[in-house]
Structures are given as structure tokens and as C-alpha cells.
Amino acid sequence: MGRRSPGSTTAGRRSRDRILRASLDLITEVGIDRVRVAEIARRAEMSSGQVMYYFTSKEHILLETLAWREHEETAQRRAELPRTAPGWPRLELFVDLYLPFSLTDPVWILWMEAWARAPHSGEVSLFLDELMRPWREDLAEIVEQGIAERVFRPSGPVDDFPIRFCAVLDGLSVLRLRQMPDLPAERLVELAMNSARAELGPRR
């Protein structure tokens, strides 16, 4: 998965971002297995050779596109969360930002494409776990602050809560995207918050 060129120059970063932007659109539309490098190149207004200068394979393009969007989402989330009251309101915002906003949410499509490859590659699994780390860190901070302000009153240890709760959010997301597309987004948030309240205590 190693990048052939890190795009360390300004021009390199711009070229790489054009490829990632084109890849995001195409993977969202048809899935990574049906995407051709030549089509990515055409959308990015580059040659196939230029695309493969930055990336070693289609899987590499998929993972780097996901990482690119996750870094953007982390920056946005960390700007928004502090502007919301701590405790339940901030946790609910976190949930809303985590869950898919539609059945064609590009980031969730990327995640599901990447998850499909993880069982066959420990390297991919580690890569995805690293992408999840900022989500768990932000959630842990929300919980710690809520406990410190006596808004959350868990009945037991919460060290593993970020792992458990992110797993709940993943499950609810896949449920809506793959099994119950008619499930309203608001209901998804409600189910997630009910799970959180069961662990963190009732609203004061």
C-alpha cells in the first residue's frame, strides 16, 4: 500500500487530490471493482501513468481516498463538537456526524468497500483501525468531560465504551444501508442514544 510518491510538493499534492476527488466520485457511483484506472485518469484530467505514479493499485487508491475523506471529517468534527454543549447534546452531535447522512453517503460507501478487503489483509485491517482512532479518541473525550461535569453517571467502568459504542454505530449504519433502507435517520440516532443512555445513565 506504500505510496510511490508522497506528493510532497504543492503541485504533487494538487495532482494527488485531483485523483482522490475523481476516485471518490467513481467509487460512490459504481464501486471500486468496476472502476477502471483509465476512467479515474479521465475524470482527473490526467494520464493513467500519472495516476499510477502516485498509487500502486486500485486498492491503494480506495484506502487513500478513504483516509483523505476521514482526515477532512476529523477536522470538521473537531471544529464542530466544541461549539455544542457538553454531555448529551455533544454526544448526540457525535452520533449524527458518525451515522450515514443518506443511502449514498460517499464515506460510508468507501468504508464498506474497504471492510470487504480487511479479512484477507492484516495490513488493511491495521490501516482501517488507525483511521478509526480519532473517532474513538473524540468519543472518549466527550464521555470523560460528561462524567467530570456529572452529566453522565455510568454504573461501571467506561474504558471500553468508545469501542463498544462505535461498534453499535457501525451496526446501525450497516443495518440502514444494507437491510432497512426505509429506516429514518432520526430513528437511527434515537436507537444509538438509547444505547448510550443505558450505559452512561439517564438524562439529568
Image: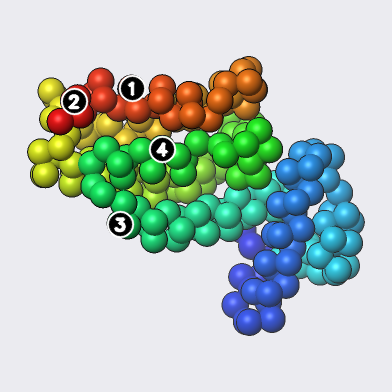
Q: Which disc is residue 77 wearing?
A: none
Q: Residues within 10 Å of mark 2 (few under 14, many from 20)?
A: few
Q: Which disc is residue 201 wearing?
A: 2
Considering depth in this image, is 189 or 24 the residue closer to the camera?
Answer: 189
Q: Residue 94, image x and y in percent?
A: 38, 43
Residue position for label 4: 95
Q: Residue 28, image x and y in percent?
A: 73, 43
Q: Secondary structure at mark 2?
A: loop
Give the Cα distance between marks 2 and 3.
22 Å
Looking at the image, the residue that sits furthest to the top is 179
Q: Which disc is residue 82 wearing?
A: 3
Q: Residues within 10 Å of mark 3 (few under 14, many from 20)?
A: few
At 21% from the left and 35% from the top, the residue drawn is 159
* Residue 68 in sight: yes
* Residues at marks 4 and 3 touching, judged by CB atoms closer than 8 Å: no
Quadrant assignment for the C terminus: top left
Give the Cα distance between marks 1 and 4.
12 Å
Pointer 1 or 4: first along the chain: 4
Residue position for label 1: 194
Give the Cα distance between marks 1 and 2.
10 Å
Pointer 4 or 3: first along the chain: 3
User: From the viewer's perspective, is 146 left or right of 168?
Assistant: left
Give the Cα distance between marks 2 and 4.
17 Å
**Count of numbered labels shown in the rendering:** 4
Q: Amino acid at mark 1?
A: Asn
